[in-house]
Amino acid sequence: MNDLFDFEALEPPRARTTDPATSHAAAFGIEKKVTKLQGIIVDCLRSSYAGATTGEMSIALGIPRDTLSPRMRTLEKMGMVMETDEVRALPGGRSQIVWKAI
């Protein structure tokens, strides 16, 4: 079953070379749109100077980590967040990637 927030399966919007300039502008604008959940994630990372793991964001936002994690690569591909070289351990001891907003 597809998640309503998951756009990874969709191809990016495109315009044909023969389309008018307005079509190209619309395709570019749609490509930069984010879902509400993606926006919440990016806002959370922007407010954190040191970045955050999905576990830390889960605690801060009250959203399950397994809801946040699948969105990180999509946001990275969109150029909105980046994976850092840093990892942090959660209380359970598992290491997680630290993400930062771009």
Image (cartoon, helix red, strand yellow):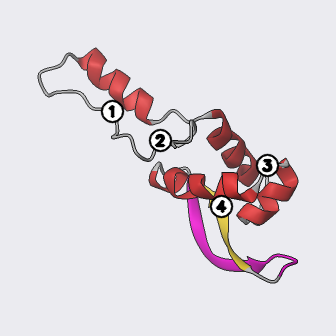
Given this view, does label 4 or label 3 mark the residue nearer the observer? 3
Instruction: Please report whichever mark, 4 or 3, sits nearer to the chain's N-terminal start.
Output: 3
Q: Is residue 22 magenta?
A: no
Q: Residue 53: image x %, image y %?
A: 73, 66
Q: Secondary structure at mark 3?
A: loop
Label placed on residue 7: 2
Structural distance between the alpha carbons of marks 2 and 4: 21 Å
Given this view, does label 4 or label 1 mark the residue nearer the observer? 1
Kindly give the residue lying farthest to the front in the view shown. Answer: 1
Q: Secondary structure at mark 4?
A: strand
Q: Secondary structure at mark 1?
A: loop
Residue at x-position 79% and y-position 49%: 63
Name the residue beneath numbered marker 4.
100
Residue at x-position 36% and y-position 22%: 26
Q: Which range of residues does the magenta coloring cover?
A: 81-92
Given this view, does label 3 or label 1 mark the residue nearer the observer? 3
Question: In the image, is 52 to the left or to the right of 20?
Answer: right
Answer with the quarter of the image where residue 100 lies.
bottom right
Structural distance between the alpha carbons of marks 4 and 3: 18 Å
Label placed on residue 61: none
Q: Residue 96: image x %, image y %?
A: 69, 75
Given this view, does label 1 or label 2 mark the residue nearer the observer? 2
